[in-house]
Amino acid sequence: MRVLVTGSGGQLGSELRRLTDSSADFVFVDRQAMPLEQPETFRAVFEEVRPEVLINAGAYTAVDKAEAERALAYAVNASAVGELAALCKEFGTLLIHVSTDYVFDGTATHPYLETDTVHPLGVYGSSKEEGERLALAGHNRTIIIRTSWVYSYYGKNFVKTMLRLLREKETLGVVNDQVGRPTYAADLASAILDITHQYAVLPLEQQLTDPRFYGIYQYADYGVISWYDLTVAIAQEVHATCTVKPITTAEYPTPAKRPAYSVLSTTKIEEAFGLHIPLWKDSLKACLSRF
């Protein structure tokens, strides 16, 4: 089964490439080969690869910069997704599209369900929410997987930033009033590959009719913590001497407003595909061991 993966240079794309170990079934394209802000490049790639599954791991993820780069964020996170969905429908391709917890406003008091009302706080979240809508409207074999607080060995992310700051600083203040479920990109990649395999082994008729392969799911590692908690765990794991202190969101203002409560329920994806989701602390150790 031919699987096309966009955003191969990002955190998720890099982990997918590592886990597939250069399998001939997977074709990876980066932002140079298939820039998502240039939809005129998409058809040529589809015609060459003829994918049976598209994993759209590419996205505009600069949350703060998105406030000033609204047009680019919407081009990549929304318009491109609609174009990809249309091509997937034309080519008979399953679309697996990755979205975000930032589609919610963070005012909930219970883990967000896939059916809860979305209300993004900023441009990044609203562009991703629009992408979800366009994907589902454009193709009846579309899986949306929302995730949260993604980190990995690759790319720019919170864990790598904290590793650097813990080395450079004697004292470090980290926000303690935003909570969520961290996600190791390798865990998310493994889950997506599991879903892809389950799809691949189905007879064609079941691929076309199995209701699991349409709709919104959510994936994040187990455990609800704050950014401060995550930083303390990193510091303990690497035996950092830096003192980590909790601060409030108000003490660390950013151009984009973040959801205070960003906890996603993952029951639906676990039950639908029989996935095992690891604890965040185990996954953090696995990631840090790679540095």
Image: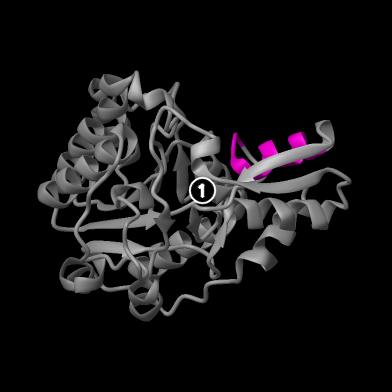
Q: Residue farthest to the left?
A: 137
Q: Residue at x 75, y 35 (%)?
A: 165
Task: Bin the neighbour count of mark 1 within 10 Å (Cα to Cα): few under 14, some 14-19, many 20 and up.
Answer: few
Residue 89 placement, left or right of 254: left
Percent of width and height locating residue 126: 25, 39
Which residue corresponds to the image point at 50% horizontal and 42% vertical from the top-left? Answer: 249
Residue 71 occupies which quadrant of the picture? Answer: top left
The quadrant holding residue 82 is top left
Give the camera-side residue of 203 and 234. 234
- Image point 32% across, 46% down: which residue? 51
Task: Give the structural element (helix, strand or loop) at label 1.
Answer: loop
Q: Quadrant of the C terminus?
A: top right
Residue 22 visible from this viewpoint: no
Position of 259 compared to 221: left or right? left
Q: Main secondary structure of the magenta part?
A: helix
Q: Quadrant of the N terminus?
A: bottom left
Answer yes or no: is residue 13 visible: yes
Q: Is residue 118 magenta?
A: no
Which range is magenta?
Answer: 155-166
Q: Amino acid at mark 1?
A: Ala
Residue 164 placement (x, y as % from top left):
76, 35
Colouring used for the render: one colour
Frontmost residue, 148 versus 187: 148
Give x and y (percent) for residue 134: 15, 43
Asked whether 159 falls inside the magenta stretch, the response is: yes
Q: Residue at x 40, y 37 (%)?
A: 58
Residue 269 lies, in percent from the top left, at: 36, 72
Q: Is residue 168 above or below residue 132?
A: above
In this figure, which residue is indicated by the disc labeled 1? 24
Picture layout, residue 131 above or below residue 94: above
